Amino acid sequence: MKTKTRTQITKALCTLMLLILPAGGAPAAADTTSFVAHYTTASLSAQEHTARNLMNSDRAAYALPALTLDPELCRIARIKSEDMRDNQYFAHTSPTYGDVRAMLTHFGYRFSGAGENIAHHATVEKCQAAFLSSPGHRSNIMSRAYTKFGVGVALDQNGHVYLTQIFAR
């Protein structure tokens, strides 16, 4: 059942991408000198949509309600992913912002509890699989204590994904 749902999601995203290609059918050439691209806009990237759908699909498989996607948490999660990429580290504690609670406070986000999942893999799907295979990360995903979350993606120079999930209540 889970595989069928992920396959349906992937097909839907591919269809969506075909609908938004510019005239001529090919996307514009990527700017390899900058990572700014669309990761600084308010809308989620296609990879972030996939990450959100996979996370909530995994919750649904265990009869848990979907978490509400919070745009401000998405913005902060994207900043965390970019921070890891730009400062070449991979850790829950940022040399720039500290841990997730310190980062949320830094950006003026009000919360009573918070958690964070981070991954760096070739794809969003591999990131989610890694989260589920780790007891601590899985606990954040399956927790009933959190009511909302944000997801942020940044790509490294090889096109691999830095994925951050921030959970809050």
Image: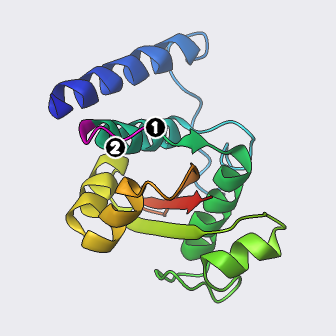
Q: Tell me if label 2 and label 1 are in contact, CB under 8 Å.
A: yes
158, above or below 52, in the image = below
Q: Earlier in the sequence, mark 2 or mark 1?
A: 2
Q: Is residue 134 magenta?
A: no
**Residue named by callout 1:** 66
Which amino acid, by three-letter code, is at mark 1?
A: Ala
What residue is shown at x 66% (from left), y 77% (from top)?
101
Res 57 label: none
Residue 79 as seen in the image, left or right of residue 59: right
Residue 25 picture location, percent across and down: 50, 13
Q: Quadrant of the N terminus?
A: top left
Q: Disc 2 residue type?
A: Arg
Q: How many residues crowd mark 2 within 10 Å: few (<14), some (14–19), many (20+)?
A: some
Q: CA distance from mark 2 to mark 1?
A: 7 Å
Q: Closest to the observer: 51 or 64?
A: 64
Query: Does any portion of residue 1 appear in the rendered image?
Result: yes
Pick out the residue farthest to the bottom.
Answer: 95
**Residue situated in front as seen by the camera: 51 or 11:** 51
Q: Which residues are magenta?
A: 61-65
For the C terminus, the image quarter is bottom right
> For the point 52% across and 11% down, which residue is it?
19
Residue at 61% over, 84% down: 94
The front one of 165 and 10 is: 165
Give the number of the disc on residue 59: 2
Residue at image position (32%, 53%) is 128
* Residue 159: x %, y % from top left: 43, 55
Q: Specify few, some or many for label 1: CA neighbours under 10 Å numbering under 14, 14-19, or 20 or more.
A: some
Spot the residue most to the right.
108
